[in-house]
Amino acid sequence: MDQYDCQLTSVDVPSAPPGTATMRLIRKPYKMRLKTERSGSRFVVTNTDDGRPLIRLELFHDTVAGLKPITVGFEVLSGTTLEQTRTLVDTMNERIIGVAVSPK
């Protein structure tokens, strides 16, 4: 065996010397499968601090990890009455059945 030049390929892989800062690179997005998370949801009408109506998204389940720690609200145009906002929310709840979240 001494007469043959045997080398393991893992030994030839370049590596940084000890103590050198290195950076781990992630795969390019087109090679990764993006996971889409879904949850049932509904919209409710609340008031802002200044009394204007606000539409808030409520999730039925805590399955969407990215949205668990945040509150999502939608402001309506000034001049929109509370009754108009309630009508809008009723229509949204009839037509929108859930929320789907995935990373860019």
Image: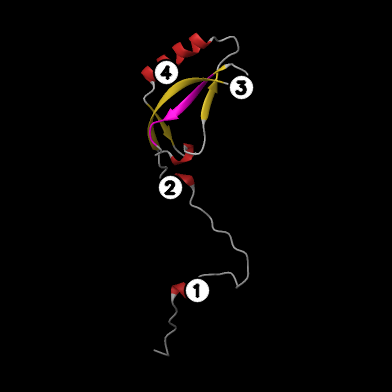
The reply to whether callout 1 and callout 3 are in contact (CB within 8 Å) is no
- Which stretch is magenta? 54-61
Using the rendered view, name the quadrant where residue 1 is placed.
bottom left
Badge nearest the viewer, 1 or 2: 2
**Residue 100 disc label:** none
Q: Residue at x 52, y 11 (%)?
A: 82
The secondary structure that most of the magenta stretch takes on is: strand
Mark 4 against mark 2, which lies toward the viewer? Answer: 4
Label 4 vs label 3, nearer the camera = 3
**Residue drawn where x is 40% and y is 42% of the image:** 35
- Kindly state the secondary structure of the residue where label 4 is placed: helix
Along the line of sight, which residue is nearer the eye, 47 or 7? Answer: 47
- For the residues labelled 4 and 3, say whether their Cβ atoms are less than 8 Å apart: no
Mark positioned earlier in the residue sequence (1 or 4): 1
| Badge 3 amino acid | Asp
8, 97: nearer the viewer: 97
Cα distance between the residues tagged 4 and 2 = 33 Å
User: In the rendered structure, which disc, 1 or 2, sits on the residue that comes first in sequence?
Assistant: 1
Residue marked by disc 3: 49
Q: Residues within 10 Å of mark 4 (few under 14, many from 20)?
A: some
Residue at the (51%, 29%) spot, across then down? 72
What crowding class fits label 1: few (fewer than 14 Cα within 10 Å), some (14-19), or many (20 or more)? few
Front one among 8 and 21: 21
Residues marked 2 and 3 touching at CB (< 8 Å): no
- On the rendered structure, is 33 left or right of 49? left
As shown in the figure, which amino acid type bears the numbered disc 4?
A: Met
Q: Which amino acid type is marked by label 2?
A: Met
Frontmost of labels 1 and 3 is 3
Amino acid type assigned to the residue bearing label 1 in the image: Asp
Sequence order check, earlier mark of 4 and 3: 3
What residue would you read off at disc 2?
32
Q: Which residue is mark 1?
A: 12
